Structure formats: C-alpha cells, structure tokens
Amino acid sequence: MASKASLIAKAFGGGGAFSQIADPTVAAGSRKLSKNAMATGATGAPVSYANLAAFPASGNTAGDIGFATDTKSSYMWDGVAWQRISIGSQIGPRYTTPPPATHALNNDGTTATTITAAAVDESGFPITYDWDAYSGSTIYSASSLPPQLTSVTESNGAFSLVGSSNQSNQGTFVFRAKASDGVLFTPAITTVSLSFGYNVSNISYDNFSINVGYTSSETNPTCVAFNPAGTIMFVCGTNGRKVLQYTLNSAFSLDGLQTAYTPGNGVELELDISGQDTYPTGLIFNNTGTKMYLTGDTNNKTFVYTLPTPFSLASASYDNVSYNYSAAIGSTQATHIAFNNNGTKLYISSAEVITQCSLSTAYDPSTFTTDSKSFDAGSQVDEAANLTFNNDGTKMFMGDYGDDTVHQYSLGTAFDISTTSYDNVTHTFTEDTALRGLTFANNGSKLFMAGTQNNSIYQYSCE
C-alpha cells in the first residue's frame, strides 16, 4: 500500500509541476494549494520549522514538504518557492468586524463616509480587501462607479466612499466588500443610499418662523404637521389647547406668515381639544386626511377625530374614541405615535423607548397587536420630542426635550424597529431652547421645529 506521502505526491502529478488554482496576483509563498492542485515528487517525512520565514530558501528538491508550527500548516517546495498545502474543505476568511447592513453617503461631493470590514484567515494568512457593487443587473467596479459615487478608496478593510453632489444621482445600490486569503474570498453586502433630503447633518435655518401667540389664542406650540402637498399646516399647543390650521402661500414654506399677527390672518380654523387632553404631544393624520390622531401627555392616550373634508378642521369632530397602550408598552406614558406608509404598523413612543405594533385594519389603533419589537434610544435621548420616519422607513429621527437636539437613526430593514442603529448624526437647535415638536416636508428637504421658549414654529433646510 502506498504511503500517505506517496499518495500526496501522486496527487501533485509528475516532475513537481502543479496546476495553480490560487489567485495568480498573490506572490509565491502566500498561495494556498488545494488537494486537487498537488503534484508528485515528495518523499520522506516533513521537517518542522517555527514559521515560513525559517524554511530553507536553497538546497531544496521539488516536492520537499515542511511543516510550520506557528500556523500549523504544511508547505511544499515547487522548485522556486514554498507553497502551502491545503487538504480538506477550503474555508474562506471569517469576518470579525462585518460591514453594516446599510450606509448613507454624504451628498456634498467631497466628504467621505467609511464602510469598515475586518476579517481573519483560519491559518493566519494575510487578508486583502476588494469590492464591487450592483444595482439591478448592472455590475460596478473601480473602473465603473455607481452614479451615487465619485470615488472609492480602500485601506486595510476601510472603504472610503465619496457621494455625488448631483441630486439626479440619488438612489441606492448594493456594495459588496470582499475579504480574500489568496484563494477564497468571503463577501459581505451593504445597501448604500444617496439622498438629498432628511439630512440632519446639513441643517440650516431658513430665517422663516411664525409666532403662534401672535396669530391665535394659543401659545406653547408642541406639535406641527402638514398635509401631503405642504399647503396646510397644523399646530397644536398647551395653552389654548387647540389645533390651529394655517394656509401657506407656498408649499412647505412659512414665508409670508411672519406678518400674520391677528386671528383670521394666517390662522384659518381652530379646533378645541381641551376636553380630551391638556398637554398634546403628538399630531398625525391617516393617509387620506379623514382621520386625525392626537396623543397627549396628560392622559397618555391617543384621541381620534373625523375630518369630513380631508385635511381640514372644518366640521372636524371627536370620535369619542381613545386608546391606551399601557398593556403593549409596559408603561402608562405614551407621548407620540407614528404609522408606516400604509398604516399597517404603529409605533408608540414612551419617553425614549419605541415599541412596534401591527394593525389588522390600516390606521385603526383599536386593531393593534404587539410585534415584540422595540428600540431604546436612552443612550441619546432623555425624553422624545417627536417620532418621525423618512419616506421609505430606513431612517428615524427623534428630538430630545432635554438638549434641543435631533438624533438620526438607520433601520436595516424598512420600518422594522428591531433593526435600528444610531447614526451618530445630530443637530442642536439654537433658535429656541425649548424643543417640543419636529416634522419634515414630505420629501425631507425641509424640517419644522416647534419651540415653546418663543412660542414659534421654525423652518430649516436639510439637503
């Protein structure tokens, strides 16, 4: 019976020649050889060495075998260099720091954002990194970048991506990091997005505001909301306990309302909500504008109103229906709610903890069941001033009563609160030191803040 050594030798083929299956760009001495790539010529027992550097560089015969004790690997002399022998199943690199599931690019055209990956080889071989990308059926590489990118550089697993400043290039693509040990590579994918709205890192004050105390009997605005077209604004406060309706001259613009100092000049309609709650904290609508949901901190309930004319307080009335979520959230404090795009998901804010529920009937909180999913933003937020998502549910924004700061989060799966991670992106407001409410324009290009220090609503750009 042939010895193991002769069997290994036979697998290599005669004369010490072998068929190289490794990455040909990897230098000799760093290549792995599979058992199917071996050649004949090895005789005798292998000699042990401390490491590959200790292997003899001369006096070797093609087919000689040595063993490196540091990596516990066998090597064969191919007549030029020592090549590692791999017997058994090939195992690719293993990620110790996998890339994130999602990544948002900066849109100024110059500032790089970084996707970081780190991997190890089971035998200690050095790891190199590369990348490619795709969108639909289109494949991208260093020579053909996705339109969302202007450059990609890599250093030891850190991929620096510079996003485009051209708004027409906004969108998403899949970025694939590849960690290679010289034979096999292990992929990891990240969904990369370029957007020009909902950009908290680039907020600027538009110098437009409206003091609701001048335009109505209400002060201390705590909530602000809009119809989808941005032509009607709704404000709710804690002094008059009313919802105020304003008609805007331009969509999502407070310009022109600054001089509206008397009731009826700016404020079109008012709805008294004092019979339901005396400290409203959240105001949202269903997608058709026929239902309005007001959440209050006094009774910690959501109250439902019917609007016969969509997004108009004319003839609006209370449904005598309210919802207490204490059984779902394990707390009597519910200060804000939000829906996903089709109203089948409900998100409840209790201080800094967000709980996700499902609705069997869209936009009907009476049909909710808990999804057993939640996110605690307590490391950033003491008490939430709002609960807001971007259009596709991949971003969430929470304002903090305590420090007048809005914080940005990413959701790995759209509208799945259990996949939330903090982006470490913030903006602190200086126009008012009593942040109480926040909302975005429907395309994320504008942000509106309700502040009670000056009893005003403020307008910002965030592109």
Image (tube, helix red, strand yellow):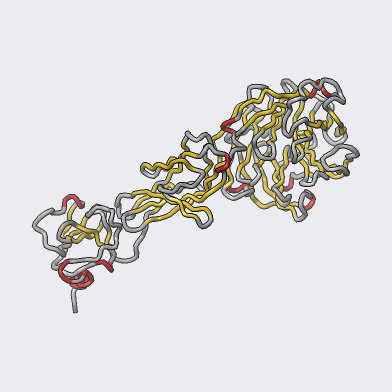
Q: Quadrant of the N terminus?
A: bottom left
- Give left or right: position of 219 versus 64: right
Residue at the bottom extreme?
1
User: Residue 9 location in percent, x, y?
Assistant: 19, 70
Q: x%, y% of residue 216?
A: 84, 24
* Residue at (52, 34) in percent of width and height: 108
- Image coordinates of residue 33 in percent, x first then y, are 27, 62
> Between residues 430 and 329, which one lies in front from this camera angle?
430
Residue that protrudes farthest toward the right in the picture: 315
Q: Is residue 393 above or below residue 270?
A: below
Count how many numbered circles sit on residues in the image: 0
In which quadrant of the rendered view does residue 64 lie? bottom left
Depth check: 306 or 43 in front? 306
| Residue at the extreme left of the image, as rendered | 59
Quarter of the image with the C terminus in it: top right
Residue 231: image x %, image y %? 77, 35
At 47% from the left and 34% from the top, the residue drawn is 110
- Left or right for 430, reference 144: right
Q: Residue at the spot x=17%, y=54% of the render?
A: 49
Q: Nearer the viewer, residue 137 or 352?
A: 137
Q: Quick one: 267 or 157, which is closer to the camera? A: 267
Does residue 125 sit above or below 350 in this rendering?
below
Classify 388 as above or below 174. above
Q: In the visual, does 340 lie left or right of 301?
A: left
